[in-house]
Amino acid sequence: MSVRSPRTVRVLAAAGAAVAVATLATACGADSSDDEKPQHRSFALHGRTLTVDSDDSRLDLVPGDGDQVKVTRWFQGSTVVGSSPKATWKWQSDEDRLTLRLHCNGLIADCSVRHRIEVPRGIAVAVRNDDGSVHARDFKNGLDITTSDGSVRVENASGPLRLTGEDGSLHASGIDARRVTVHSEDGSARVDLRTAPARVEATTQDGALTLGLPGSAAYDVTTDTQDGAVDVSVPRDTHSDHRVSARTEDGKVTVRTAN
């Protein structure tokens, strides 16, 4: 019978860890787009607002036909040391809440997941994504999107718009909303509107802020920055019904005529 000394065990463990790291190095970079067999689910809405609670996922939101929320999921994952990775979804019908989670735990793990969410037309959407980008387009009802680590991109939206980001850029274009609220903790923010809004409130803590407004109207513009330049080139009128507030702690403020 052979007896392994504590030093031998430590050497074997270190060798095993080195092999695991080398294995991950050759297989890292999981990409959800490599999933050739995405999964599909549908959920019945009961109210007028869909809430999406997600983490560690890229989200693509678009209007869809019918009266159900349709979700497509692409997932790739592997672990060298740890439990098998998985992505889960849960529907709470009493709250119209879709919860998306990625379980990718272990000493060495590599996972990627993406969800495409088709929302019935006429439904407002509230999104909370802890780690991952969000892209929404062609919505006519309200959008309220918050991310803690990831960019947000919105295109062609006409309902009330609220964007909040802790770490990542915020970009909205083709916006027809009467009310727009934008707040970024760490990242630039840019909003381009096609029609003159009634109210815009936009702030950044650390990042440039750019607002593009139609030149067909004059605006009651308020700006403030602790450390950065201010450039306002739109028509101004302190009595205007179109009120715009643009403030930064550290970053340039630009309020210009939209292209």
Image (cartoon, grey):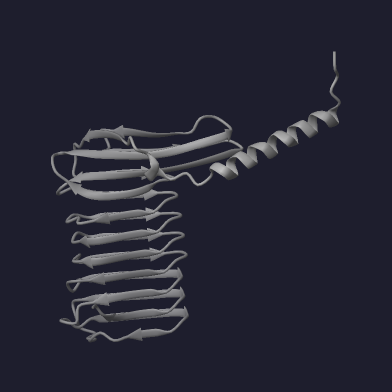
Q: Residue at x 45, y 76 (%)?
A: 251
Task: Give x and y (percent) for residue 24.
Answer: 58, 41
* Residue furthest front in the image: 26
Task: Give the total number of marks visible in the rendering.
Answer: 0
Q: Nearer the viewer, residue 235 or 149?
A: 149
Q: Residue at x 58, y 32 (%)?
A: 82
Q: Residue at x 21, y 60 (%)?
A: 157
Task: Give x and y (percent) for residue 142.
Answer: 22, 55
259 relative to 168, above or below: below
Q: Quadrant of residue 37?
A: top left
Task: Give x and y (percent) for residue 81.
Answer: 60, 33
Q: Nearer the viewer, residue 170 or 8?
A: 8
Q: Nearer the viewer, residue 91 or 40?
A: 40
240 relative to 162, above or below: below
* Residue furthest top in the image: 1
Q: Is there any visible trace of residue 5 in the rendered image?
A: yes
Task: Give x and y (percent) for residue 72.
Answer: 29, 39
In the drawing, does residue 250 fall left or right of residue 80?
left
In the drawing, does residue 153 fall left or right of residue 46?
right
Q: Is there any visible trace of residue 49 in the rendered image?
A: no
Image quadrant for the C terminus?
bottom left
133 relative to 24, above or below: below
Image quadrant for the N terminus?
top right
Q: Residue at x 48, y 41 (%)?
A: 111
Q: Quadrant of residue 22?
A: top right
